[in-house]
Image (cartoon, rainbow, N blue to C red):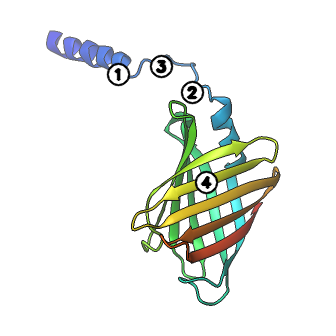
Amino acid sequence: MKSLVKITMFVAAVSVFLHPVLPGEPTEIQQSPELKVLQRFIGSWEQQVVSKPAQWTPQKQTMGLTTKCEWILGGRMLQSKGEWSPGGIETLILMTYDAEKKVYRQWYFDSKGIIPRGEELGKWDEATKTLTWTGRLGNGITKTGVTRFIDKDTNEWTVVFKDSDGKVLLDMEGKAKRK
């Protein structure tokens, strides 16, 4: 019986040590003004996307993209999960603000491995309500993108991939409306 009491007390002590938040205390971190910029993405979105003629897409294509964005990791990381239509390709985008380097960071993944992987770095312009992204994705491929917030329920975005010679590989634009 004494050993059961000792084990229970040990587990309780370890639990407090590993999880120092007391009952009733908020578990979310206080977000920096920079992280609050990403709050604009929170929610469910319907997007209309146009892929202009380019190396990877010789003909103009119109697609839909449905996404849901939410905070993860205690409000330090934004997660956006989505699905392209037609095609049903699943997407995952992670975004955060790196306070040490004073830059936004973004990563895109999809279920088909269509888009080259790599980190993108971003800058926020409060005057124009615009996030501008740049990335080097390997094999000489670069990516530039811009997301402009029109109002609290609408944003427009563009993304362009180029090869090392400056040839446009992919040129897309989209308009997102909050559901």
**Which amino acid is tagged 3?**
Val
Q: Is residue 153 above or below residue 15?
A: below
What residue does disc 1 label? 18
Q: Quadrant of the N terminus?
A: top left
What residue does disc 2 label? 29
Point 65% across, 73% down: residue: 172
Between residue 59 and residue 109, name the one nearer to us: 59
What residue does disc 4 label? 133
Q: Is residue 20 above or below residue 167?
A: above
**Which amino acid is tagged 1?**
Leu
**Which amino acid is tagged 2?**
Ile
**Lateral position of residue 85 relative to residue 100, left or right:** right
Between residue 75 and residue 37, name the one nearer to us: 37
Instruction: Tell me the CA gap for discs 1 and 3.
Output: 9 Å
Query: Which of the 4 image quarters holds residue 68?
Result: bottom right
Of labels 2 and 4, the one closer to you? 4
Looking at the image, is mark 2 or mark 1 earlier in the sequence?
Answer: 1
Instruction: Tell me the CA gap for discs 3 and 2.
Output: 12 Å
Looking at the image, is mark 2 or mark 4 earlier in the sequence?
Answer: 2
Q: Quadrant of the C terminus?
A: bottom right
Looking at the image, is mark 3 or mark 2 earlier in the sequence?
Answer: 3
Of labels 3 and 2, the one closer to you? 2
Looking at the image, is mark 4 or mark 1 earlier in the sequence?
Answer: 1
Q: Which mark is residue 21?
A: 3
Of labels 4 and 1, the one closer to you? 4
